[in-house]
Image (tube, helix red, strand yellow):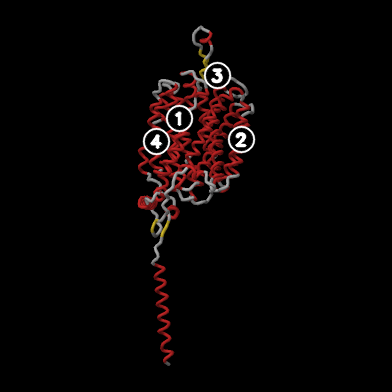
Amino acid sequence: MATKSTEPVTILSLRKLSLGTAETQIKEPKTFTVEDAVETVGFGRFHIALFLIMGSTGVSAMESMLIALCLLSISGCEWQLENWQVMVFFGYMVFSILFGLLADRYGRWKILLISFLWGAYFSLLTSFAPSYIWFVFLRTMVGCGVSGHSQGLIIKTEFLPTKYRGYMLPLSQVFWLTGSLLIIGLASVIIPTIGWRWLVRVASIPGIILIMAFKFIPESARFNVSTGNTPAALATLEHIAKMNRAVMPEGKLVEPILEKRGKFADLLDAKYLRTTLQIWVIWLGISFAYYGVILASAELLERDMVCGSKSDSEVVVTQGDSEEGQSPCHCHMFAPSDYRTMIISTVGEIALNPLNILGINFLGRRLSLSITMGCTALFFLLLNICTSSAGLIGFLFMLRALVAANFNTIYIYTAEVYPTTMRALGMGTSGSLCRIGAMVAPFISQVLMSASVLGALCLFSSVCVICAISAFTLPIETKGRALQQIK
């Protein structure tokens, strides 16, 4: 009987030990990362405001199109310059890397604001340029500012949940299209009446207005937490959750503090070397094709390359009676029909956006890019076909659609493939290579095309084929992949 009476006591003591162990496990603190918070909070009103404000950085399209639209008036009619002298992308190439380094070290938001202030200031000064040398210098300074606009895309990328990046980032093309159409429409009215200088002044206004809206978008939480500023990151995430009417994850925000950021050598690290080199090739080729299409469109319209016919808009100006004065200065001004054609072809930049979004999200970034690059090569070759005016417009329309899709995909891929410690630098160096392609494009689309249209278009096509192969063989697919915080 004594033995039986002690058994319940032994059982009770075991139960007490078991309960004590459970209590210890429950008291362990919960933690979460920025990635967890971004995914938990989800998509909402904050992201809509982010899309509208940061997407509007696409007004930089106005600065890119401005060169092509003012080209004839500046180079041929006012300062009598050769086509090969019209190259103003050097500033973008240099400062793209510099702004990338600074953005990884000091913040994306600060660099974006500085770049817009810089670009707007020098853009206004350009309209007062007294000579071609001053024009080139000031446009170079504008290029320096525009090179920092890509930080807007990085901020969007770092705030968007994984499943929404493939949908929302390509939709930013709407703003690029809006900027392009706006500058073409303004040019058709302003250049023939009050001149290109007023066009430059009017084109700088949207950028100035946009600067005032930047205060509504905070610094990237991923950047803040990577520099050890966890309270700022947490405050930003809580603000997003409040705007989205969502609940933050339970626990404490924890991320490793990353001391080494923005190192150029990291891009050439063994883990990213192949990816970086192939990305550079693709960026260079896409930019070469994109600006080639823009400048070739202007050149084809100027020469009216419709089955070898000659443009009615060509005006021959002679100066004096001397032999030198009688050598003509060919001053080609766009006719109203040419502006309409450019508007139609520019609309093509969004024509394939729905298909591009489907391709990015279902086929993946690599396969989608390789397909659109291959189609771009094909349509460059089709421009060699002797066709009607409608046929030429159709080919230009499709080319603009394809090169825009290429840019959409490579922008998304580059922002996703690199970790936070080098994301801005990766985008910056890619943008720098991009400008090399833009600087070479005028030689081909204007100088070489003057000698051989077939040779120029075949060269553009060949470059696109190389880019298609590089895209298909990229070692990392970023579809559905969470953004990496460290290497």
Q: List the residue tagged with mark 2.
A: 377
Q: Give the residue furthest to the top.
A: 321
Asked if one can make out residue 247 in the rendered structure from this viewpoint, the answer is no
Earlier-in-chain disc, 4 versus 2? 4
Q: Mark 3 or mark 1, which has the lower sequence index?
A: 1
The type of residue carrying mark 3 is: Asp
Seen at 48% across and 34% down, the residue is 93
**Residue drawn at 49 percent across, 46 percent down:** 418
Q: Residues within 10 Å of mark 1 (few under 14, many from 20)?
A: many
Q: Give the spatial CA distance, label 3 vs label 4.
A: 40 Å
Q: Are marks 3 and 1 in contact (CB under 8 Å)?
A: no
State which tag comes first along the sequence, 2 or 3. Answer: 3
Q: CA distance from mark 3 to mark 1?
A: 24 Å
Picture layout, residue 205 above or below residue 234: above
Of circles 4 and 2, the one toward us is 4
Which residue is disc 4 drawn over?
116
> Based on the displayed image, in which of its 4 quarters is residue 213 positioned?
top left
What amino acid type is highlighted by mark number 1? Ile
Pick the front one: 393 or 470: 470
What whole-number distance in Å separates the C-alpha atoms at marks 2 and 3?
A: 30 Å
Q: Are marks 4 and 2 in contact (CB under 8 Å)?
A: no
Q: Report, in whole angstroms, how far the alpha carbon at label 1 lies from the one at label 4.
A: 18 Å
Q: Residue furthest right?
A: 385
Q: Which residue is mark 1?
A: 183
Q: Amino acid at mark 4?
A: Phe
